Image (tube, coloured by chain):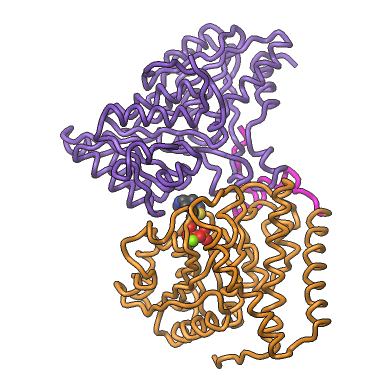
Chain colours: A orange, B purple
Amino acid sequence: MAKKRITKATYLKWYEDMLFWRKFEDMAAALYIQQKIRGFLHLYNGQEAILAGSAYAMEEGDNMITAYRNHVQPMALGEDPRRIMAELMGKVTGTSRGKGGSMHMFSPEKGFWGGHGIVGGQIPLGAGLAFADQYLGRNNVTLTYMGDGAIRQGSWHETANLAMLWKLPVVFCVENNGYAMGTSVERTAGQTPIHKLGEGYDMPNRAVDGMDPIAVYDAVYEAAERARRGDGPTLLEIRTYRYKGHSMSDPQKYRTKEEVAEYQAKDPITLCLNKIKEKNWATEEEITSINQRVKDLVAECVKFAEESDFPDASELYQGIYAQEDYPFIKN
Amino acid sequence: MKTIQFREAVCEAMTEEMRRDENIFLMGEEVAEYNGAYKASKGMLDEFGPKRVLDTPIAELGFAGISVGAAMNGLRPIVEFMTFNFSMVAIDQIINNAAKMKQMSGGQINVPIVFRGPTASAGQLAATHSQAFESWYANCPGLKVVVPSNPYDCKGLLKSAIRDNDPVIFMESEQMYGDKGEVPEGEYLLPIGVADIKRKGTDVTIVSFGKIIKVAYEAADMLAKEGISCEIIDLRTVRPIDYDTVIESVKKTNRLVCLEEAWPLGSIATEITYKVQSEAFDYLDAPVKRITTTDTPAPYSPTLLEAFLPQVGQVIDAVKSVMYVK
Ligand SMILES: Cc1ncc(C[n+]2csc(CCOP(=O)(O)OP(=O)(O)O)c2C)c(N)n1
Ligand SMILES: [Mg+2]
């Protein structure tokens, strides 16, 4: 695949997308406080440049899979954000008809395969999606995301070996945001940097600046091309930061306000906007109208979700087996 | 007596035992510096230091297996799973190693270890985070499985579990950690494998365990107003099961309802039902009823979750149906 140019249009899209993702997550947090969203809620704030750069590197038919910090990824691949908000509120119009909730978004038609709550559980699945593409002779790759915490699971090590052995078309992207819940990367391993975990399997690997969508695009593009050529997987350690707590009930005693501020100074949305202004790619008016569009769309998502129905109790037995008349035990 | 929270009962039990025996250590995700994901190990890092209270990476198979090995070689580990849903990553080490070592070695090797953490639903957390594996673990010879329902039972049973020379699965609940209850000021232990009659009654026996027993209490309160007297048995341990207490009660009430927060197939409720029909068939005045979750993965949506979980109304209906009253 030819490498895409980064143009004015790219920047404007990135700005609008990333701003929307940020505002969407902020709204989700507000709705959580109003108890309209329940359970766990893991927000993507701060990590948006990874998704912007990655999505730009994806081609028709490529796949993405990640963990539970997963509300905005399907939108980047074309899913209707109103359906994501509806899922967060447990409504029948949601992407999983209200059954999955915050941690389990799925849009397989758009190439988004979840949304996984068990840490590390998605790593072999990502390689399996790639296995199927290879088997079926498709020239597609699977971007498989995991946290800095998740890569300490055994599932990573077994999958890394198999993916190298079979040269699977997969790109492993570690979103290193510094922490797994309250545990810093330094406290989870005697070994750093994380991308060196590829070495034991002879897997090409490198660190990437995750606050810069261009750096992410370049790295993911290069890795995807390697996979498409049949040269197998790559491990990218994409360095980023999560601005919010791990989930909604995290007092964040494990880090300082200064540390958070340090990363917010490199905020990808602000930097993107600065670049647009510097290059005179948009007037103040145009920027205001982007901001308004974002605001309106978030409001529309909430309205759609609020006005949707909760699933009827009869839905409980739907969609569990492919067999439609599966005989459930009813006590 | 003093009043403490369930999480404090967990913490006191571990702390008291660790003071008695230097070979006991606690290991798990966020147990040390964060004081436990649910604050059940609050202050323990300060008291015992990082040698005995260890934060682990997210590597359940690794740290569970390492702890089994340590138990084989003279230590007495307490392994915390942030929830038992995540013990699935480690279940090979529990079932194939911890549970089998004694027998496979011809009785030579003990594995004195406790695996503990919360089980079952804790609200709208959906399919992977709401599972109750009590009956899975209870199915496996070599393990003991304890599921307390209040701070008093929790503390006394956890201390016994830690002193036990066999592997014990000890299951708590996120939704119980804030529950308060009275415990003695001084030391006490409760025996594993002994059920407790939480309420005396004459008309119907309700057998349950763990957090969901509170649904039985509520149902019994409402039934009492209608003049129906329920005897509520808390199994407390689901391997071994105290069948005698259940059978004695059924011989008195002649009616049985089992209440369990788990899937129906092969549940503890099913096992109790088998034993009762086998040993007290002639005493039963009605077929046994069981209330479980629905035979489905747990859903996220509040309307579906309510339909999934056992409800007070279902218990009331079951009691009335075994009494043949409307
Ligand atoms: C197998 C398993 N163990 C523990 C958990 C609880 N848990 C959920 S998220 C998390 C931290 C993961 O951190 P990381 O992989 O760095 O991802 P991040 O949250 O930073 O995006 C933990 C321990 C889980 N969901 N699954
Ligand atoms: Mg992380």
Q: Is residue A266 visible?
A: yes
Q: Position of residue B238 (x, y in %)?
A: 43, 27
Residue at 70%, 57% (x, y): give it: A28
The question of residue B305 being in magenta is answered with: no
- The C terminus of chain B: image quadrant: top right
Q: Is residue A187 left or right of residue B151?
A: left
Q: Position of residue B165 (x, y in %)?
A: 26, 29
Q: Is residue A92 left or right of residue B104?
A: right
- In the rendered image of this protein, does residue B317 appear above or below residue A206? above
Q: Position of residue B291 (x, y in %)?
A: 60, 28
Q: Which residues are magenta?
A: A308-331
- In the rendered image of this protein, does residue A213 appear above or below residue B232? below
Quarter of the figure with residue A264: bottom right
The question of residue A327 being in magenta is answered with: yes
Residue at 66%, 30% (x, y): give it: B311
Quarter of the figure with residue A105: bottom right
Magenta region, mostly helix, strand or loop?
loop
Nearer to us in this view, B261 or A301: A301
Quarter of the figure with residue B192: top left
Q: Is residue A131 visible?
A: no
Q: Position of residue B209 (x, y in %)?
A: 51, 25
